[in-house]
C-alpha cells in the first residue's frame, strides 16, 4: 500500500488483516506508521536484514497475483528507513525486471539473509524455495552500497 496511513497507537489484535505488514513497534507499542516512498505490496515469506541503525533491506517473498487467485514469488529488493518515531520511508531498489547483463537472484521465498560485514554491510542470502516451490541451492552476496548482487560459487 503506497498511500500514507495516519499514525496512532493501536492494539495489534484489533488491526484489520490487510494492515498487518505495516505494523511497526517502537518501545513495545504497536503503531501504524506514516509511510512515504514506494512501499512494497502485501508480502509474505520474505527476508529482511538491518544494515544500519535506521535502515533495513528486504528481498523476495510472495505477493498476491493481480487476479487474486494465488501468490507469486518475487525477486525484488526494497529498503525501509526509519525517518522518525512514526514515519518509515520505503524505496524500491530494483523491480522484478532486471537486464540480462546484471546478476540477480531468481524469485524466492522462505530464504535467509544476514549481514556479514558491519562497516559497509554486505548481506549473504542462502536457500529458499523458487517460484515452483522447489528448494533453491545457491548463495548470493548483496553489496548494500551499490545494491549489486554477486553469486557465490560453491
Image: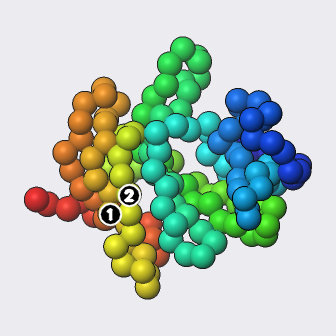
Q: Residues within 10 Å of mark 1 (few under 14, many from 20)?
A: many
Q: Tell me which corner region of the image, top left, top right, bottom left or bottom right, holds residue 141.
A: bottom left
Residue lying at 34% horizontally and 73% vertically, measured from the top left = 116
- The numbered mark, 2 or 1, whose residue comes first in the sequence reads 2
* Residue 72 position in % (x across, y down): 45, 28
**Pointer 2 residue:** 113
* Residue 51 position in % (x across, y down): 50, 71
Q: Is residue 20 above or below residue 57?
A: above
* Residue 6 position in % (x across, y down): 89, 49
* Residue 138 position in % (x across, y down): 21, 50
**Pointer 1 residue:** 124
Residue lying at 32% horizontally and 50% vertically, measured from the top left = 105
Task: Give the quadrant of the C terminus.
Answer: bottom left
Q: Residue furthest left?
A: 154
> Is 70 placed left or right of 23 in the picture?
left
Q: Nearer the viewer, residue 24 or 131?
A: 24
Evaluate whether residue 85 shows in this view: yes
Q: Which mark is residue 133?
A: none
> Is 145 placed left or right of 14 in the picture?
left
Amino acid at each position: 500500500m503506497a498511500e500514507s496511513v495516519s499514525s496512532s497507537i493501536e492494539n495489534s489484535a484489533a488491526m484489520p488483516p490487510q494492515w498487518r505488514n505495516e505494523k511497526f513497534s517502537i518501545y513495545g507499542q504497536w503503531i501504524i506508521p506514516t509511510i512515504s516512498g514506494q512501499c512494497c505490496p502485501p508480502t509474505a515469506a520474505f527476508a529482511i536484514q538491518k544494515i544500519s541503525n535506521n535502515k533495513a533491506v528486504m528481498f523476495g517473498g510472495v505477493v498476491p497475483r493481480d487476479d487474486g487467485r494465488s501468490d507469486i514469488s518475487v525477486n525484488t529488493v526494497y529498503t525501509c528507513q526509519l525517518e522518525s518515531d512514526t514515519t518509515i520511508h520505503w524505496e524500491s531498489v530494483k523491480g522484478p525486471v532486471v537486464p540480462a547483463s546484471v546478476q540477480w537472484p531468481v524469485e524466492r521465498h522462505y530464504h535467509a539473509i544476514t549481514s556479514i560485514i558491519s562497516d559497509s554491510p554486505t548481506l549473504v542470502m542462502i536457500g529458499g524455495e523458487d517460484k515452483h516451490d522447489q528448494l533453491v541451492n545457491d548463495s548470493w552476496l548483496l553489496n548494500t552500497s551499490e545494491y549489486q548482487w554477486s553469486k557465490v560459487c560453491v
